[in-house]
Amino acid sequence: KAGVTQTPRYLIKTRGQQVTLSCSPISGHRSVSWYQQTPGQGLQFLFEYFSETQRNKGNFPGRFSGRQFSNSRSEMNVSTLELGDSALYLCASSLTGAGNQPQHFGDGTRLSIL
Amino acid sequence: AQSVAQPEDQVNVAEGNPLTVKCTYSVSGNPYLFWYVQYPNRGLQFLLKYITGDNLVKGSYGFEAEFNKSQTSFHLKKPSALVSDSALYFCAVRDVNRGSTLGRLYFGRGTQLTVWP
């Protein structure tokens, strides 16, 4: 079974631009979560989607948004990029997001802002 | 509020020796606990979880973890370390009594494990 696939693996953008990251979950998984990983802040939760609905959201500004499609694939968008948005963005999927289910992570998209 | 603490930024151990990576947590209800490992330029890989039952849980690659409710700890252990175990280890928790946090994991800051030959 294929794992979680994130594209692209690397992105370089400049301040003020916007970016869209893509995540394809494991087949059959309907819950998709996004995390931001930085050396200073560690792993921070962005949001979680289930059945095309945002079910949970972390403490990030409105510039960070996401969506989920009917096939459970998810995208996240960051508008008006800032230098501090440079990070590894990780997507994770699970069957339903229930508490006893481990999340399975992709290898991430490394976003660099110049 | 939920939180996870990994008190050691780094753990160094010789190959063949036992290793322990420490984790303590704080939740308002009952915890679901997880350990993940991250290799350079990769995502997180699930190692093991504690949901309920035996306090000692076994996971992938020979790792195990001991849940201690009174000490609110969930330390990761391995009897004999390998050089290939060198990686970044994360402890994570969910508070099962807070339905609004479904799908959300709270992570520790990570512990860099180095196993030297």
Image (spheres, helix red, strand yellow):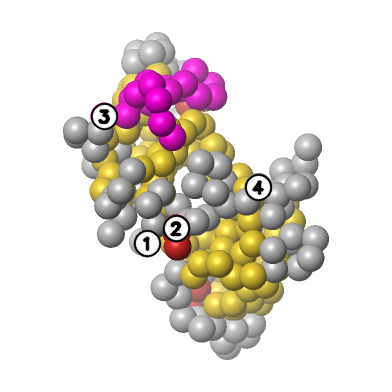
Dot 4, crowdedness within 10 Å: few (<14), some or many (≥20)? some
Are dots 2 and 1 in contact, CB under 8 Å? no
Residue B57 within the magenta-colored segment of the rendering:
yes
Are dots 4 and 3 in contact, CB under 8 Å? no
Give the chain of mark 2: B
Q: Where does residue A33 sit, x and y in percent of width and height?
A: 58, 59
- The residue tagged 4 is A95
> What residue is shown at x 30% (from left), y 48% (from top)?
B29
Magenta region, residue range: B51-68
- Residue B68 in the image: above or below residue B38: above
- The residue tagged 1 is A41
Q: CA distance from mark 4 to mark 1?
A: 28 Å
Q: Quadrant of residue A16?
A: bottom right
The quadrant of the picture occupied by the N terminus of chain B is bottom left
> What residue is shown at x 45% (from left), y 69% (from top)?
A58
Look at label 4 and name its amino acid: Leu
Q: CA distance from mark 1 to mark 3?
A: 27 Å
For the residues carrying marks 4 and 1, which lies nearer the camera in this image?
Answer: 4
Give the chain of mark 4: A
For the residues carrying marks 2 and 1, which lies nearer the camera in this image?
Answer: 2
Disc 4 element: loop
Mark nearer the N terminus (2 vs 3): 3
Whether labels 2 and 1 belong to a single chain: the reply is no
Mark nearer the N terminus (4 vs 1): 1
Whether labels 4 and 1 belong to a single chain: the reply is yes
Look at label 2 and name its amino acid: Gly
Residue B99 bears which disc, if any? 2
Look at label 1 and name its amino acid: Gln
> What residue is shown at x 46% (from left), y 21% (from top)?
B58
